[in-house]
Every structure is written in structure tokens, then in C-alpha cells.
Image (cartoon, rainbow, N blue to C red):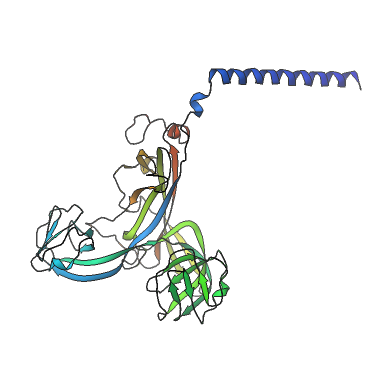
Amino acid sequence: MSVNTMRRKVTYSLVLLIFSLALFVFSSYAYFTNMYEDAFMGEMGIVDVSLEAYFETVTQSSNLASASDVTFDTHTITSVVIDLSVYTDGSTIRIDNSNSNEGYLTVSGTPTANSLVVLEDLTYEAPGQTITIDQVVLENIPANEVVISSSNKYTATDLGFVASTHTITSSTTNLSVYADGDTIRIFNSNSNDRHYTVSGTPTSTALVVVEDLTNETAGTSISIDKVVTKPGVYHINIVSSGNESYFEDFRLIVYVYSSLGTYLRVKMHEQLTLTYTDYQGDITELSILFDGYMPFKYNTTNWYDNRINDNYLYYKSPVERIDEFTPTELPLISEYFSTQDYATSPPGYSLQIAFSIEAVQFIGGPEEVWDLTTKPWDGLTW
């Protein structure tokens, strides 16, 4: 070994030794002086939240009546023309064509023929407007992801649905073409139109899905196909008010499973689209530019809309689960405006929507993770 080589090795060894000693001294100083105590200080626990998107849809209607002598005051609805005693305690009634009280209300107590009390607050409204009232059954239908492509489509009148076993049956459709984990779509049924996830290996006559089904006997001409979807991107109908995925019926709720105080924020991603089919049968989807935001009615109780600055809606209080088995529910969109109707778009248009949610522990989380030194809604420190 040459002298120069020996010198280089000795030099490298000395440098490595000095670096190791410096690192030891620095880490020891940091440990004994709690140098990083503030950066890592926080409460031990679980931060866990989720979002659910669905449509609140009327599945049954009864006792429909209209009159121009209906009065709304505080919690009471009165009418001489309409027999209000047909509505039952705890039922949901729908008010239509009202200037200030349109929407769904919950009957409280036993109504008389001329008077009915509801749980919700009412805005005073004198007689004069022709008001329509009916008793309805509401169902929460999960929002479906946007379909990119479909295959294995069949239409038959013998498709049946069994709620207790999550099973779809047919004697003429070969259900074995679908595989475990596939996303299938049901449409034109009376009660089961939506996307489902296949569970296990289907037979030619029976298929089990993960999601709940509603009992429905065969007879209606129902279609089934396998679909590929845009993950996390949901379709909202903005054309037809009678559609079960209509804009006004869209709902969004946050579930908090955290075991310690949690701040959270939600970002909405909205995209208008135009879809058309050309003369060769090819489908084209175009993105439509628009200014502003879609007119959802966001819940203003404890929520703060900061989208003009950073595109987020913030929940203003730290929140945690009720107990180990029960999450706290925070509705973000729970209704539409009672005094206005959404302005529908021409056929072919739709809204595609996605959202992201971020959650941090209330001690140090907003500052360290979001890089926010003050609260967006009041400018005060966390």
C-alpha cells in the first residue's frame, strides 16, 4: 500500500470519527434539554374521519292534498280544506309550492282535522298560495361513481332481489359472467337501482352483493351490467328533477371516529360535463368551464366556508366520537333551499363531484400539518 493511499484512509477515518462525535454530542444535548419537545408534543389517540355521499329520495307518497288556505306559524300548520288528521305522529310530510316552508317536515303528536304540529321551525306564511302536502317515505340512496365503461349487459324480466341474503337471482341471465369484486349496475328496477360489489363467485342463477338490497320480485324489465368507474368521483343529475340522483337531493355527511379532539376540513371538486353520442355510437365527454361554485346549501352550523381563500370548508370546533362504537355525525349538506328550485340544464349535461377530507388532532395539528398559525374564521390562534 502506498504512503498516499495510507494517508487518505487515515484522513477519511478521522473525518468520520469527528462527525460521529459531533452527532453524539448534538443528540445528547437535544435529549437532555428537550430541544424538540414543542415539535412532537401531542395527545395520544386515534384521528379517523370519513365522508358519505347519498341522495335523499322519496320512495312512497300518500295522502296528497292541496289548498290555498294553509297557514304556517312557528311549529303549526293549519287548514280547513285539508284534513290534516290523516297524517300520523312521527311521519314525514312534504310541503310543496310554499314560499318559505318547502321541504320535508316531521309530524309531532296526533294532528287534528285542521291543525298539525311539526318538530322543525316554520317561517310564518299567511294563506293565499296553493300549498301541496303529502306523506312520504324517504330513502337514502348511495351516490354512484361516474361510469367510464360497461360490459356484459343483460335485460330480463325475471331478475329478483332478496334482502335477507343480499342475493340477485335470475333463471335466464347467466350471472356467472360476473366475478368476485366486480362492480355491477342495476337500472330500471323498482327499488334497487344503484351500483353493487359482487361478493364471492356467482352461479349462473344467483349472485351475492356486499351492499343491502330491497326485496323485489321478478316481473319488471331490469338491466344489469358490469361497470368500470372513476374512483371517488360521483355523478349528480342536473337535468331532471324526478331523477333519484338529482342535484337538490344530494346529501353529504362527515363521520368522526377519532378518540381525541379533531379539527377537520373538506375540499369539494366540481366539474360540469357534457356527454353526447355521435352517429357511429361513440360516446364523448367534454368538461365545461364555469365560474364560481355549484349552489349547494351548506350547513352553516359550526362550518366555515373558506373556499375563496384556500378551497376548504372548515369545521370550527374540535370534535371526537361519541363512544367506541358510535361516531359523531356532522352533516355538511343536509337539505336544499326551501324557497328556490335548482335551474336545470339541457339533456346531456351532468355534474361530477369529488371531495377530500383532512383531519388533524386539535393540539398542534393545524399549525404543524396545515401550516395555519391562526383560525381562518376569526384570525385567533388555535
Question: Is 378 drawn above or below residue 193 in the view shown?
Answer: above
Residue 213 visible, this orientation: yes
Image: 151 above or below 341: below
Q: Residue furthest right?
A: 1
From the viewer's side, name the closer residue of 187 and 345: 187
* 18 up-or-down from 200: above or below: above
For the point 35% across and 53% down, the residue is: 294
Q: Position of residue 319 (x, y in %)?
A: 37, 40
Q: Which residue is at the far left? A: 80
Front-lying residue, 218 or 312: 218
Q: Is residue 277 visible?
A: no
Whole-percent x, y for residue 221 in the image: 42, 80
**Viewer-closest of 154 and 203:** 203
Horizontal relation, residue 19 to residue 354: left or right:
right
Q: Quadrant of residue 259?
A: top left
Question: Looking at the image, which residue is at 41% across and 35% down?
Answer: 362
Task: Report the side of 1 relative to 229 (left or right).
Answer: right
Question: Which residue appears at 40% of the width and 43% of the height?
Answer: 265
In the image, taking residue 284 as reference, residue 66 lies left or right, namely: left
Q: How many marks?
A: 0
Residue 186: x %, y % from top left: 45, 71
Placement of the C terminus among the 4 image quadrants: top left
